[in-house]
Amino acid sequence: MSTLPARSMRRRRVRGTNPLEYLKRPWMQLTLLASFVFLYFPIVTLIAFSFNDSRRNITWRGFTWKYYEKAFNNASLHDAFVNSMIVAGTSTLVSTALGAMLGLALYRYRFPWKGTYEGVAHLPIVIPEICMGVAMLVFFNAINMDLSLITITVSHIAFTIPFVAVVIRARMAGFDVSLEEASHDLGASEWQTFWHITFPYMVPGLVAGALMAFVLSLDDFVITFFTAGVGSTTFPIKIYSMLRFSVTPEVNAASTVLIVITLSLTLIAMIMQSRWAKGRQE
Amino acid sequence: MTEQAPIIRVRNVTKRFGSVTAVDDVSIDIRQGEFFALLGPSGCGKTTLLRMLAGFETTSEGEIEIDGQPMLGVPPNRRPVNMVFQSYAVFPHMTVFDNVAYGLKVTGVGKSEIAERVKEALTLVHLEDFGRRKPDQLSGGQRQRVALARALVKKPKVLLLDEPLSALDAKLREAMRLELVHLQHSVGITFVIVTHDQDEALSMADRAAVMDHGVVRQVAAPATLYEHPNSRFVADFIGKMNLLEAKVAGLSGGRLAIDIEGLERFEVPHDGPASGEIGIAVRPEKTRLSKEQPAAGRLGLKGKVSDVAYYGNESHILLDTDTGVRFTTTIQNETRRSDSSILIGDDLWISWSPEDTLVLSE
């Protein structure tokens, strides 16, 4: 900046904005505001009305925690929440392990038909959820497996693996292979090299992948709907069934809880990511 | 030293990647305690050869022996060699101390011994106060020292260095050259260094192997490589060289009679056979420019100065001879005005002594 001729500096100041400072332009700010309203108004309304002291979600009648209490004491909602946690927790553990292995294998090895294999492995990301759900249902029927929490968990593992694999692969793209060679050269076995060198490097990817899998599993509706049996209702399905009777602030309260969990997990992931990025820059 | 068995014996080693032959029937002996350089342009197979010594690549054919032991099928972690990588490959999530200790920890060395040996190794590379730092708090030169300490702490029979100075800036590189040589003298370990930089090889190595397209062209001490190259490739790759095509007119009593266009037939000392078309070479600093025809006994060609390149301590003059050969010659800028004495377009004679003439039959 200091090397610029004084005249052009003055001219810029008169006009007020630099060419690249889009955010200072009114029309840009307006567009931003409009998109924020469009995106978040429904969610904000949902959260606001969970505190509404009225049985109907139409007019504001004052603040209350009543419906949170009610939702918390609702035994079936409580059960559904526990079910969701079991499913999300188990499927996250399994899919993170399998997805990490898949990501690592795709990063490291070259083998015949790799492209095809990769495409097929990542299919669950693009395949419509409804197809996935139906396919799972047909599959469990064919092998005579009763629908339960297990079938839900298995389906969730199946569709979250590729997401983890993608994250791990992206992480490994920046890995310096000579680190592994150096470890090997210094006397470490393959196994020692993996745990001392490769695994620590993968950790941020594993955390990000696991959180992603957890959130995907926690709020999945379509696939779960097809693979859930009697007594294996998850949280999103329970909320949906409550809606069919009437839209009470209790539903809002339950949804808000789900939103808060999802948001906090995402926040944690983002903080960890930025900490790791900072640690690398220093 | 010459009586000792070589620490590394490479016999007829070939490495193929698919249809590409990266290393082609190479045989080299590397002596105990030697600073040995593998020198060549990029893609000549020098790094592949080094990686075969380290065990990261298998040999397609031939044998490698290190310290008398055949290395076929021996993985890198069981070989008595350690490597300093071009990227240094310092483990980013470990402190300097842990980096250096790593190779001892994974092989089950006791804690107190680790502490002692790591301290010793860090002192060797002048990093004794940096043990608790993380690699991202170090400069490039310091990271390289960590890589050196990490390899040396293992007390290898041979230290392999893959282009160790290429990532450093020019001043640091010069300093590190000297330091590596001092280090090698103080630890007494055989160093094998891969480099594409001929200055590096000449200034550091006891001996160097010049490689080209997977083939070793010449293995010799730096001065021999420079003054007695055995082929056009080595002559041209090491330093600057003026090459002329010539014909053998006769060979008798260790003197070779040569015909070159524009010169009278002359004789140079030569042992060994030679016939037909040969190459004649002369180093730029062994030629002299003059306004008048040079004295009898010197070989001289007349030409026109086509370019003058100023390098501070010396200038490089390009001279196109009347016979169509382009010569390079160097003149020392001994006084502050000496650069202006030769101008483009000047008609000058270039001359050299027959004794400084190299005969290259390959």
Image (cartoon, rainbow, N blue to C red):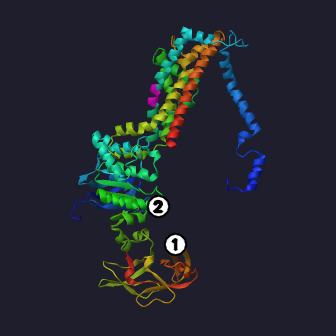
Residue farthest to the front, as pictured? B129
**CA distance separating discs 2 and 1:** 17 Å
Q: Quadrant of residue B271?
A: bottom left
Q: Secondary structure at mark 1?
A: loop
Magenta stretch: residue A94 in it? yes
Vertical placement of residue A190 versus A77, above or below: below
Q: Is residue A77 left or right of residue B66?
A: right
Residue A147 position within the rendered picture, expressed as x and y whole percent measured from the top left: 49, 15
B254 displayed left or right of A238: left
Where is residue B260 drawn, in percent x and y? Answer: 44, 83
- Write the start and end of the magenta stretch as one range: A93-98
Residue carrying label 2 = B171
Q: Is residue B61 above or below residue A269?
A: below
Q: Earlier in the sequence, mark 2 or mark 1?
A: 2
Q: Which residue is mark 1?
A: B312
* Amino acid type, callout 1: Gly
Q: Nearer the viewer, residue A135 or B231?
A: B231
Can residue A112 be seen in the rendering of this structure? Answer: no
Q: How many marks?
A: 2
- Other-residue count near label 2 (Cα within 10 Å), few / some / many at <14 / 14–19 / ≥20: few
Q: Residue at x 57, y 81 (%)?
A: B343
Chain to which the residue tagged by mark 1 belongs: B
Residue B211 lies in the magenta stretch = no
Q: Residue at x 76, y 51 (%)?
A: A10
